[in-house]
Amino acid sequence: IKCTCAEMLCCCGKCLVIHFCYLHCVVDCRWLYRDSLEIEDFKNKYVFVTGCDTGFGNLLCKKLDRKGFRVLAGCLTEKGADDLKECRALSELSCDVTSQDSIEKAMEWTKTLGLVNNVDVHYPWHTESKLNGVIAMTMTFLPLIKQARGRIVNVASVLGRFAVESFSDCLRHPLLWIKVCIVEPGFFKTAVTSLEPIERELHRLWNQLSPEVKASYGDKYLDNVNVNIQRLIMNAVCDSDLTKVTNCMEHALSAAYPRTRYSAGWDAKLCLDPPLLHAFLCS
């Protein structure tokens, strides 16, 4: 049977496409299987989580407790600690990540396999103090985590992620036997994304400005900010399903092969996917 060159090329092209699809399926199945593997003996694994009064930290502690981890929850208020008293294998203590004395007292309480720095670095006025808290927590607990060959999970929001990402990347490469993961949530309905504290902080910052700076913006600058429109936008953008974030945190702690980066929420995936390729190439 005679075949033309065009027919042969077409046949070869189809074979290559089929071969590529098969290889892609094999790689995907292998990745999914590897991603589903978990570490063993959760009941002897200690995890310290900061920022547990509300939101992601509070929900994560309850999930880890149900899974069997020994959880130490760092709370800033008594109300937050009281909400976690129902958990069996969970201990709560007062922990202020901006205070080195508070951090060192927390370290005396536990043997740590995992550390979750659940600090909300969402806005410019949070960055310095909260980032210093992440660094202080990590460096204080690092000897324990090294000894346990454990892992560190840092939460970096969409708006305040660059400093936390850079610190995590610098930490990861020299400490190859410690897993350092970054969870990057988008906008979710938590106390941090509530408009009331944001408005109070804006007014506080406005009152600190000099008369010259205020004049450059106009005396009625804050009055012209339409709060109702802001609230409508925040309600439309913010996701109420916090488990999208806590599932990522849980996987980072319990998986045998945790990922370097996790993006939770459609907006996080839209904004943060390019660094995933960079992390893959560097790792």
Image (tube, grey):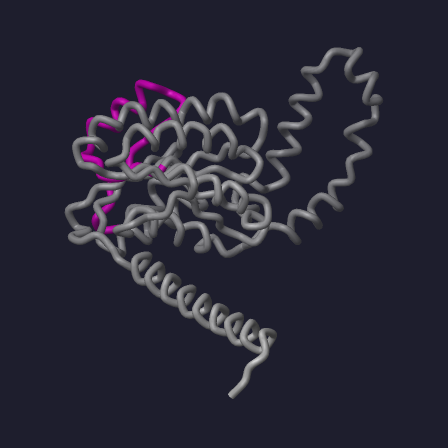
Inspect this view and state whether residue 157 appears.
yes
Q: Is residue 206 left or right of residue 140?
A: right
The relative height of residue 26 versus residue 172 in the rendered view (above or below) is below
Extreme residue in the front direction = 2
Please name whichever residue, 238 or 282, is drawn nearer the observer in this view of the structure. Answer: 282
Q: Is residue 66 left or right of residue 6?
A: left
Question: Quadrant location of residue 216?
Answer: top right
Is residue 92 located in the magenta-colored stretch of the structure? yes
Q: Position of residue 157 (x, y in %)?
A: 51, 39
Question: Quadrant location of residue 183?
Answer: top left
Q: Position of residue 230 (x, y in %)?
A: 71, 43
Is residue 232 located in the magenta-colored stretch of the structure? no
What residue lies at 70% left-to-right and 21% top-to-bottom?
206
What residue lies at 57% left-to-right and 54% top-to-bottom?
266
Extreme residue in the bottom direction = 1
What residue lies at 54% left-to-right and 43% top-to-bottom?
274
Image quadrant holding the C terminus, namely top left
What residue lies at 35% left-to-right and 22% top-to-bottom?
136
Q: Position of residue 151 (x, y in %)?
A: 28, 39
Inspect this view and state whether residue 86 appears.
no
Q: Is residue 243 left or right of residue 14?
A: left
Q: Position of residue 277 (x, y in %)?
A: 48, 44
Give the magenta range: 87-116
Q: Is residue 225 left or right of residue 172?
A: right
The relative height of residue 139 versus residue 15 in the rendered view (above or below) is above
The relative height of residue 41 versus residue 5 in the rendered view (above or below) is above
